[in-house]
Amino acid sequence: MSDSELNLLRDLDYSVVQQCMHCGMCLPTCPTYATTLLERSSPRGRIAMMRAIADGRRELSRSFAEEMYFCLGCLACQTACPAGVNYSELFENARAEVERQGLLDTPKRKRIRRWTLRWLFVERTRLHLLGRLLRLYQRSGLERLVRASGLLRLLPASLRELEPLTPRISRRFTAPLHARSVDPPSPRYRVALLSGCVQDIAFADTNADTIYALRQNGCAVRLPDDQACCGSLHAHNGDGEMARDLARRNIDAFAPDTVDAIIVNAGGCGSHMKHYDHLLADDPKYAERAKTWSEKVKDIHEFLAEIDFRAPRAGCGVDQVTYHESCHLKHGQQVSEAPRQILRAIPDLDLVELVEADWCCGSAGIYNITQPETSMRLLDRKMGHVRNTGVRVVATGNPGCVIQLQHGGQREEMDVDVVHPISLLAAAYRGEGEKS
Amino acid sequence: MLSSEASMQVPPLAYIHTRMNDEIIDGLRAFLRDEQILTADEDLDVYSFDGTAMLHQKPRCITLPETAAEVSRILALANAENVPVVTRGSGTGLAGGSVPVDGCIVLCLVRLDKIVELDAKNLVMVVEPGVLTGTIADTASAAGLFYPPDPGSIKISTIGGNVANNSGGLRGLKYGVTRDYIMALEVVLADGQVLHTGSKCVKDVAGFSLRDLFIGSEGCLGVITKVTLKLIPQPASKKTMLALFDSMTAAAATVSAIIESKIIPCTLEFLDRVTVECVEGYAQIGLPTDCEALLLMEVDGHAAEVDEQAEQILALAKEGGAREVRLAESADEALRLASARRTAFSALARLAPTVVLEDITVPRSELARMVALIEDVGRRHGVKVGTFGHMGDGNLHPTFLCDERDEEEMHRVEAALQEVFDGAIELGGTITGEHGVGLAKKPFLPAQLGEVGIAMLRRLKDSFDPQGILNPGKVFD
Ligand SMILES: Cc1cc2nc3c(=O)[nH]c(=O)nc-3n(C[C@H](O)[C@H](O)[C@H](O)COP(=O)(O)OP(=O)(O)OC[C@H]3O[C@@H](n4cnc5c(N)ncnc54)[C@H](O)[C@@H]3O)c2cc1C
Ligand code: SF4
Ligand code: SF4
């Protein structure tokens, strides 16, 4: 096939594009449509543009490319669509085609993409290295110095805004924390945990809490050493090749047939990992194992609810919490009730519902870097709703959302803590010892 | 004297329009910001259709006015230049009403989205046309008031679209349709002049009711820029019920029996097996997928009255042969059921790429016959049909599931449609109960209205819009 004939949108199974019957039921759930009120920034409009390309009526244009990166990939439209349109597949293929044709290429963008997608988020050792450097920067006093010096003012405003979005790096990464608790003597389930990229270096405690909560529920927890990044960042940013490569590496590292479940505590990673079967469907060597893999991937909340987790006997030290739904947990995986069920099971903890809980916070992978203005607008909207609950603790099941909401708290000078629901559960389990 | 048909022949309105061109676009730029005028290829593509299957046509440009004054200036310019204008709300219409005509300006009103006033003293709300129907319902509800019309598209349709199509909804049986809640309108006429018609007064007979002419006018007579809505008090209590049947005709007969026994539920919705399967496939709320017909019913009012009516209805359903009857246990469950019902049309698209939806309505005593006729037509032409609808209003949506790329199949669908329309008219019904005529039903309108009816529509159109710039070619020629 010549290069001009090759087109990832045209190669898509046509029924996927044709599935949209343009009823508009998804429009009111789309954050970008709410922002512009333009049909092109709506799911229906985006699909129509993709269809025009798939039909051969239009070529990809720069303005199409920009629209595909204006889309958050939050998948709210997919939840809303009664016709069963697979927006996530359309979206990933569209972005991949944009990258294949290099429509948005600039030397700087290429450099950043190469550095993040092809170097940093590939090997965990590299992330660990970056993590250590950042930790040094944050804890040596250098950070305070830089902030005080006004050096940051040299950055353009949009980037300066983002500096506080760099997460606080954990004192220890996940692996040493794994040994903080022990597997139950006669486990009911054998599970393996994805330690994640950001989660591993910035929220290692969340991983430790996840391991603890699993062990409290009769699970033996393995932490595969040679696991790689899950590849969601790559798939969502048009690098399908690397995404497939990482999927293969993880299947090898986890050996899915040796465990009852593969546990993920980051909504974004889990949503993507559940689709390895799809991603590797054409790979003769991996297709079968990818299917087993996809069956076994479980979000931590989903898994705990399925195995009838044990309700803790003590509180978690917090009396009120509100819950923000990570897009890829709610819309990508349809896990919505389980986290609430866990929060409600904690004694003396009151769950206050958040208005528009399932509306994107603007984090959306690296959206807060690529589209800072829209991202901040969505964040302000979210923080407004948080303020209205009057609650000081927000629980959410995805590291990207945690970072974004923490930043929101700083921006609005609000006194809020952002935690993973599982950390509250683990705290409650730990409290049982103290209580007795 | 209009005594004979012959004297009423008014020839089709054959307009000769100017195609929109760059100079006219420059004219628009004189009072609109660049960002309010869209001409990029991608934009022309995404505004080339509405919710109707198979109809598309690219416009020449799209304008996004933000005030009535801007609407007026756009129309004045278009009228002076003799360029067609197609008004659009959210583009969820199901008759092709907002599908552009070649070379036109699309006037998209979604940015006129302010609630101007909630006047609780007079039970009135004043809104701009781009306000979403759901926002109106929520705002009324927050003030303890009620705006009843609730089309399936409530979360995204605009009030302007609702008025222009005189949309119905799930509560039409007891509460009527959009028309019953319109007190006054502000309308920009084809030449840009602004007309105010109606008032906040409960009674008002000053002059002919021009207001009523614009309700259901499908963007052909003027552009609605402000709507004064009537609100009513919230009912104190309500109950939602489900009844499952093993035959469609038994369900239809039950509906007739309920109406005959002088109970007026607010909702009496019907879904056939194909539709229930699709809705359950999406909503996953535990609807049974092995029954031939499902009735979703709701009664509201004072608590005692509601209890009594619910019991009566459940008894009637059992007598009518319902296999199972059930009362929704909580307000949450009732809401889930109604929301699921609203997805019926879109959910049917799970089964086929093209969903051709019809909107026939018959006198309610004829429901069982109409339902049987649809089943029979589908079978004879070998077309898959899913039927659902506002059974209490006699309004059915037989939906033909097909693939527009299969020409042979589309011919069979066309033949089936014709028979369904003929059948409906024969039973004293109408080809459209709530979606309007637009482009999709235009060929079938003369058969229903007759020569005199069409001639009067032409005269009316001619007096409001002599150059025919407003949505030309829609409803009739
Ligand atoms: C899933 C689904 C369910 C639906 N359920 C129902 C239902 O239960 N009952 C029902 O009646 N309809 C239903 N509809 C049809 C549709 O939603 C209604 O007709 C609705 O009123 C259209 O509103 P809109 O804002 O999308 O208008 P559009 O589709 O944009 O326009 C509709 C017509 O109104 C004209 N128009 C729009 N705004 C104005 C204005 N301000 N001034 C003058 N003319 C204007 C347009 O030119 C066009 O002719 C449904 C549609 C869908 C997709
Ligand atoms: S994506 Fe689904 S909900 Fe949105 S317009 Fe298409 S069919 Fe309708
Ligand atoms: S993924 Fe989110 S932003 Fe993108 S079209 Fe869907 S709802 Fe809109």
Image: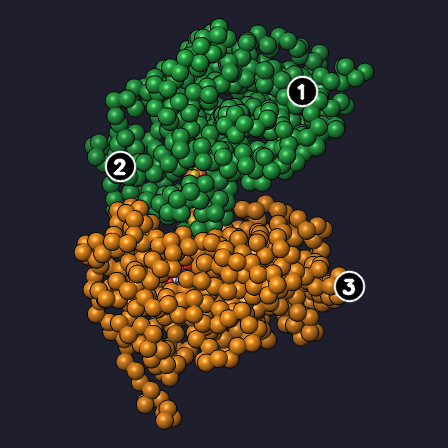
Chain colours: A green, B orange
Q: Against B322, is A239 above or below?
A: above
Q: Is residue A301 visible?
A: no
**Real-space Cα distance between discs 3 and 1?**
49 Å
The amino acid marked with disc number 2 is: Arg
Q: Earlier in the sequence, mark 2 or mark 1?
A: 2
Residue drawn at the location 66% of the way across and 36% of the way down: A352
Q: Are marks 2 and 1 on the same chain?
A: yes
Residue lying furthest right in this view? A436
Residue wearing tag 2: A62
Indicate the secondary structure of the residue bearing disc 3.
Answer: helix
A288 or A200: which is nearer to us?
A200
Residue wearing tag 1: A426
Residue wearing tag 3: B304
Quadrant hosting residue B291: bottom right
Residue drawn at the location 21% of the way across and 70% of the way down: B16
Residue drawn at the location 44% of the way across and 10% of the way down: A145
Protein chain holding label 2: A
Q: Is residue A171 visible?
A: yes
Q: Against A4, is B356 above or below?
A: below
**Real-space Cα distance between discs 3 and 2?**
63 Å
Q: Are marks 3 and 2 on the same chain?
A: no
The amino acid marked with disc number 1 is: Ala
Question: Residue A109, position in %: x, y?
Answer: 30, 24
Indicate the secondary structure of the residue bearing disc 2.
Answer: helix
Local crowd at mark 2 within 10 Å, few (<14), some, or many (≥20)?
A: few
The amino acid marked with disc number 3 is: Ala
B394 or B287: which is nearer to us?
B394
**Real-space Cα distance between discs 2 and 1?**
48 Å
Disc ID at residue A71? none
Protein chain holding label 3: B
